[in-house]
């Protein structure tokens, strides 16, 4: 029982990080119809920003917002330089463009920073743990869960109670009509990238806080997982992305914890088989997007 | 002096010409209809006026200003808007959010609350459903919401694309009554309708399109007494 609770906390922490990443992908997909594989490089940028802030003696509490800001600016820059040019192209063109952006950035990190993993200095508190009742919880896990909850509350408020947030939801459902209402396409898309950059940045801080290192390919695996989570939840659906992220986190952690040792090598395929089974049951995902067939921009 | 003037407008989708050499004017305060069979190019003309479809050739002027290549999202600030075919309300937003979004690009921000009240008094049914998701409304209610949303910019000119399409007969009456009310309030209206008989009863003037071209124009009386509309619909 104790192990189960312990692993549940791990699952919520990991699932929350996946959820934030999947949300970033879903926001861009819902508005532009693009799957942004360069989302992972936003994470890597955040990681390096944390690294260099640490190396130049900036206190961690200040380097975190700076690193997230770096991700936001990088996301907006990506949109301006690369994605705006292919905005009205086919989904395949946009997908390949995002792969290109990802590859270019990875190459830059490998050649101008380091091919190898670099350690990131974290404050002591991240490796401490606290006793709650009978079991021990890592502070980094608690921070992860708390941050995820805070981000979800913030996003819920943003999309329901700000003018821009409502405009984004409208644009996701029917972009031409949103433009008829005076919603500027460029503003909404830039805003969406800023938001997804922020989510990637926050997720990256959580990711680094569990591993204390950064490497040029750091963002690849978590974003691949987030992509699976986004599809699991219903591509383009925001609540679906959250549901998919948590479900995937639970599947991964429980399989790692409770699968017999001899099955350990098959952990990933078993996890993906479960995902496929969910999709057989609900082909459009757990919570399908409303504007799934809508025209973009 | 016309409020909207379209001259030699052509609209193309790839190699297909949806509208060719369209000339039309709508005077301030007028209620003008653009009639014609399915696929005649009526919606293409409306969509190109508001910039949702690019103008291939020709010009569109609104209040003597050329708007043919202006971005859709900037046009609402000029006071011209389109209530699109098929209602296209935001189903996942509440009724109130749909209406508030209607005022997003409005030039004068003061007066939004008044417009909101005005729309709700035009459509009392929407008031009781403010917090409901728009997707849960009936077809007729969705059409009211779509028109209400367009009214939120306090438009000088309203383009209405097939407002009665697919509605139950009692709603069709309501929508036509509403169009008269809006005209009486001073809103200039360009109406695209498949219900020709009812349209001819309320409009000042009409244009008839066939295969992308304007084939006739005239006052409601002139159009009623000629057989040009039947010809346009039968494709002869």
Image: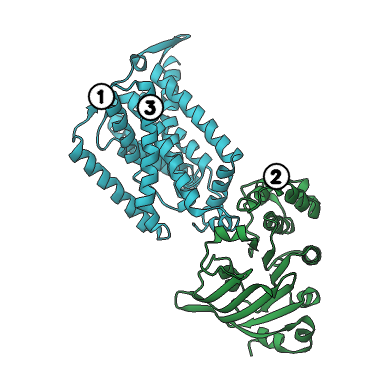
Chain colours: A cyan, B green
Residue lying at 40% horizontally and 29% vertically, measured from the top left: A65
Residue placed under numbered mark 3 in the picture: A64
Q: Helix, strand or loop at disc 1?
A: helix
Which residue is rendered at x = 76% and y = 82% of the image?
A: B219
Crowdedness near tag 3: few (<14), some (14–19) or many (≥20) residues, C-alpha within 10 Å: many
Tell which subunit mark 2 falls on: B
Label 1 belongs to which residue? A55
| Quarter-of-image position of residue B34 | bottom right
Front label number (1 vs 2) = 1
**Compared to B10, does B62 lie above or below?**
above
Seen in the image, is A264 located left or right of residue A203? left
Instruction: Please say if B38 is above or below A267.
Output: below
Kindly report the distance in space between the C-alpha atoms of the residues bearing marks 1 and 2: 53 Å
What is the distance, in whole Å, between disc 3 and disc 1 at their CAs? Answer: 13 Å
SS type, badge 2: loop
Residue A10: where, in percent of width, then height?
Answer: 41, 23
Label 2 neighbour load within 10 Å: few <14, some 14-19, many 20+: some
């Amino acid at each position: 029982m104790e192990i189960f609770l312990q692993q549940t906390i791990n699952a919520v922490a990991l699932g929350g990080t996946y959820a934030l990443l999947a949300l970033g992908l879903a926001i861009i997909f819902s508005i532009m119809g693009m799957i942004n594989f360069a989302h992972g490089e936003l994470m890597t940028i955040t990681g390096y920003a944390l690294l260099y802030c640490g190396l130049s003696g900036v206190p961690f509490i200040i380097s975190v917002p700076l690193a997230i800001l770096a991700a936001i600016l990088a996301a907006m820059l990506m949109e301006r330089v690369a994605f705006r040019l292919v905005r009205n192209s086919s989904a395949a063109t946009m997908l390949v463009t995002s792969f290109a952006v990802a590859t270019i950035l990875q190459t830059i990190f490998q050649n101008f920073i380091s091919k190898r993993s670099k350690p990131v200095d974290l404050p002591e508190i991240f490796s401490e743990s606290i006793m709650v009742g009978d079991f021990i919880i890592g502070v980094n896990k608690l921070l992860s869960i708390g941050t995820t909850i805070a981000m979800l509350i913030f996003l819920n408020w943003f999309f329901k109670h700000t003018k821009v947030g409502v405009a984004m939801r409208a644009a996701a459902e029917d972009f031409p009509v949103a433009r008829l209402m005076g919603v500027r396409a460029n503003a909404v898309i830039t805003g969406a990238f800023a938001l997804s950059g922020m989510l990637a940045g926050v997720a990256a801080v959580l990711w680094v806080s569990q591993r204390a290192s950064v490497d040029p390919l750091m963002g690849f695996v978590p974003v691949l997982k987030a992509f699976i989570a986004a599809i699991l939840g219903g591509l383009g659906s925001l609540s679906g992305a959250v549901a998919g992220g948590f479900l995937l986190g639970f599947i991964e952690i429980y399989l790692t914890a409770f699968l017999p040792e001899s099955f350990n090598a098959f952990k990933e395929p078993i996890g993906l088989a479960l995902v496929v089974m969910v999709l057989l049951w609900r082909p459009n995902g757990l919570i399908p997007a409303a504007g799934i067939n809508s025209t973009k921009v | 002096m016309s409020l909207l003037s379209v001259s030699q407008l052509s609209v193309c989708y790839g190699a297909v010409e949806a509208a060719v050499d369209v000339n039309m004017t709508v005077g301030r305060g007028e209620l003008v209809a653009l009639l014609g069979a399915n696929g005649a190019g009526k919606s293409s003309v409306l969509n190109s006026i508001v910039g949702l479809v690019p103008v291939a050739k020709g010009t569109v002027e609104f209040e003597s200003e050329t708007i043919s290549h202006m971005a859709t999202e900037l046009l609402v600030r000029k006071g011209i808007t389109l209530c699109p075919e098929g209602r296209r309300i935001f189903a996942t937003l509440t009724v109130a959010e749909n209406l508030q979004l209607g005022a997003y690009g409005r030039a004068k921000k003061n007066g939004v609350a008044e417009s909101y009240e005005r729309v709700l008094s035009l459509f009392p049914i929407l008031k009781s459903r403010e917090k409901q998701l728009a997707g849960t409304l009936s077809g007729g209610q969705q059409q009211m919401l779509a028109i209400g949303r367009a009214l939120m910019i306090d438009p000088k000119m309203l383009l209405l694309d097939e407002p009665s399409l697919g509605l139950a007969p009692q709603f069709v009456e309501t929508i036509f009554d509403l169009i008269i009310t809006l005209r009486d309030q001073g809103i200039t209206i360009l109406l695209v309708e498949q219900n020709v008989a009812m349209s001819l009863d309320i409009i000042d003037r009409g244009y008839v399109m066939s295969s992308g071209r304007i084939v006739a124009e005239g006052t409601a009386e002139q159009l009623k007494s000629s057989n040009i509309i039947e010809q346009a619909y039968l494709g002869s």
